[in-house]
Image (tube, rainbow, N blue to C red):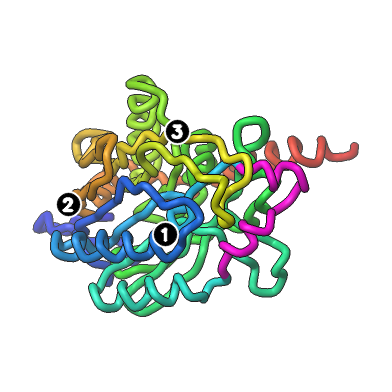
Amino acid sequence: MTKTGDNTTVIPERYCGYETRLRAGAVDFTPVPADVAANLQKMTGWIAEAADAGVGLLVFPEEALTGAIHCDDCKRIGGPCRLHRRLAETVPGPSTETLARLAAEHDMYLVVGMIEQDFHDPDSLYNAAAVIGPEGIIGTYRKLHLGSLPFVTEGVTFRPGTSLDVFETRYGPIGVQICYDFWLNPEGSRLLALQGARIIVNPTAAFAGGPDKVESMRRVAATRGQENFVFTISANQVGGIDTDESQEDSFAGALPANYAGHSLICGPDFPDFSHIYAEGSDTEGLVVANLDFETLHRWDDVCPWRQWRATHQSGTSELFATEFAKLVHGPPAR
């Protein structure tokens, strides 16, 4: 970004054409385990409430359509069980088509955690997030870093994703990270920011763990915004989830889970590096914040790090790529 002689701000070309302000929302959400219809009904209510509040982008948590549950059947067979296969949907599919109609009706972007079945390979299931806009289904992001036993069973239920894409919206490009991708792996957020993301969305199912856990969530969400000069939106499941195994459609051996809630909307607030714009609680509710992209433009004036990484710091990017390749493939042969 540059200034003209009369001190008028000139917005970089990559930002031209995007809306400059966004009323963002996230839902502290308690899914009904294994009941997609019930969860869609709940989402319909939250979407209507968000629309009444003027929200333009609304985020639901990880696996919000089904609940995120430890599953002994998946553990026993070493792959997705019958119920997980039944709950999985392709994109487009029935649930995303319903959500697309709601997005069009309310002129809103939605990011919704779900179990995705690969259209071309039905045996492959993914912990995914659907990105949907008023114009229809934009795409999906598939979680890269899957948790492992004994803590969770998603590592045997799902396959890891294989791409890091940004999705175009009228508010600018957004990137998606899911839970573990976001909280403990900063590389993904950095790469999304380098691709031009102005918002990084984090559908999550973060367990409760007392005040220290919530404080750590605040620190990480704010830090991801600070280190990349982006806004971050984390939508978490909230409250206790238990299942009745006497019901046919229940997760076998499901462990009771308690999720932290406290959805977060964070990012820079010039001249502050990081700021928590809004935070949820330990009960279901809508979290809303007003975001002004001029804040990001002002930081880009002071510290145009993306431009630096493409010019005089390009060697740093090459070095990082080389070192990562060594970790995966070993040092190059001499």
Q: Residue at x 62, y 40 (%)?
A: 253
Label 2 element class: strand
- Classify the position of the C terminus by image quarter: top right
Horizontal relation, residue 318 to residue 296: left or right: right
Disc 1 designates what residue?
112
Precedes in sequence: disc 3 or disc 1: 1
Horizontal relation, residue 111 to residue 285: left or right: right
State the extent of the magenta-drawn residues as a range.
71-89
Q: Quadrant of residue 148?
A: top right
Q: Residue at x 37, y 75 (%)?
A: 100
Q: Is disc 2 surrounded by few (<14), some (14 to 19) or many (20+) residues within 10 Å?
A: some
- Please state the horizontal and vertical placement of residue 34, each as a whole percent of the image: 51, 55
Q: Residue at x 68, y 39 (%)?
A: 324
**What secondary structure is the stretch in magenta mostly built from?**
helix
User: Was residue 83 drawn as part of the magenta stretch in this picture?
Assistant: yes
Disc 3 designates what residue?
207
Disc 2 designates what residue?
290
Nearer to us: label 2 or label 3:
3
State the separation of the CA atoms marked 3 and 1. Answer: 19 Å
State the separation of the CA atoms marked 2 and 3. Answer: 27 Å
User: Was residue 77 drawn as part of the magenta stretch in this picture?
Assistant: yes
Query: Hey, what amino acid is under mark 2?
Result: Asn
Note whether residue 194 is visible: no
Horizontal relation, residue 107 to residue 178: left or right: left
- Please state the horizontal and vertical placement of residue 80, each as a whole percent of the image: 69, 54
Precedes in sequence: disc 1 or disc 2: 1
Horizontal relation, residue 227 to residue 4: left or right: right
